[in-house]
Image: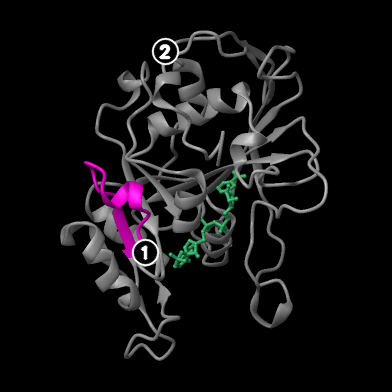
Amino acid sequence: MTSTTAPPPESAGGRTDLPPLDVLLPAAEHLPPDPREERLAALYAYGPPARGAHVVRANMVASVDGAAWGPDHRSGSINDDADWRVFRVLRALADVVLVGAGTARAEGYTALDRPRGLRHLHDAPLELAIVTRTGRVPEALARGDRAPFVLTGPAGAAAARGAVPADRVLVVGHDAEGTSPGPDAAVDLAAGLAALADRGLARVLTEGGPTLLGDLLAADLVDELCVTTTPTVVGQGPGRIVAGAAPSGTTALPPRGARLAHLLHSPEDRPGSPAGTTAARWLLPIG
Ligand SMILES: NC(=O)c1ccc[n+]([C@@H]2O[C@H](COP(=O)([O-])OP(=O)(O)OC[C@H]3O[C@@H](n4cnc5c(N)ncnc54)[C@H](OP(=O)(O)O)[C@@H]3O)[C@@H](O)[C@H]2O)c1
């Protein structure tokens, strides 16, 4: 996520000084800064649902050497203005942004607004949904004006209902036996996405984090993966954009193919956005 997934200040919305982007693939095209972002929005238009009533797009940023965050443990320290240009268009097109509670805490998420200047692309309010096993909702979200949806299992239901109105809590889980909830009761992500779609929130943008993205991929719930690679090298320490232990220490899934829908490139060296950032949109066939 994030410019990625650090929710950039809304005051940055409507900027006209964002860098140009070149479309390298499928066909060369230059995208100068455009306050309305019509062309970029067309390139990222949601496809039809294939895995349920919803379409799930993930948007993540990584350094050249694969780091998902910088030394401050935030993705904001590895992103740049080219990433931000794509990031805000993806938010403009979504019905709901889905994040793990860890990301909401690390990146300081608050209630979301549609990016300023892009409301012509989608004028409904932009909802936020967080996934949490414990039901612990970050303070800034619990006391905010607009509560997020909280996707949790039975073990997290009481805590979540103590933090946000009951109609925002979607209890979608079961324990391993499907009976009484233990503290490790899983959250049923497929049921959570179906519950959001029932509420008219079918175009989902997940901004991570790596644990949630790993679980969504393991359940084959991700339709597309948008990955920005910024020209930074972070070195040892941070994890990659997907985390989580696969059962028995092996990979949970055999490597799957992905199809490149398009590849963007930021050609200009400028303050806040060195040349070289690429933004790829990968489509994930049903596994
Ligand atoms: N590079 C990028 O694009 C990007 C994007 C996002 C985040 N990040 C970075 O990633 C780091 C955070 O990583 P993370 O893996 O901890 O993030 P995360 O997946 O957002 O957070 C993990 C927490 O979210 C909840 N959660 C996630 N998946 C769940 C599931 N399937 N079921 C139930 N609960 C679930 C749990 O919360 P509870 O503990 O409340 O149960 C879990 O402890 C931060 O440094 C952040 O800056 C990078």
Q: Which residues are magenta?
A: 137-151
Cβ of mark 1 under 8 A from ligand 1: yes
* Magenta span contains residue 145: yes
What crowding class fits label 2: few (fewer than 14 Cα within 10 Å), some (14-19), or many (20 or more)?
A: some
> Could you say where residue 36 lies in the image, as x and y percent from the top left?
42, 13
Q: Which mark is residue 242?
A: none
Residue that mark 1 sits on:
136
Of the residues shown, which amino acid type is indicated by label 2? Arg
Camera sees residue 135: yes
Cβ of mark 2 under 8 A from ligand 1: no
Q: Which sits in the foreground, 120 or 72?
A: 72
Camera sees residue 202: no
Is residue 176 positioned above or below 205 on the image? below
Q: Quadrant of the N terminus?
A: top right
Q: Which mark is residue 36?
A: 2
Is residue 92 positioned above or below 23 on the image? below
- Numbered-mark total: 2
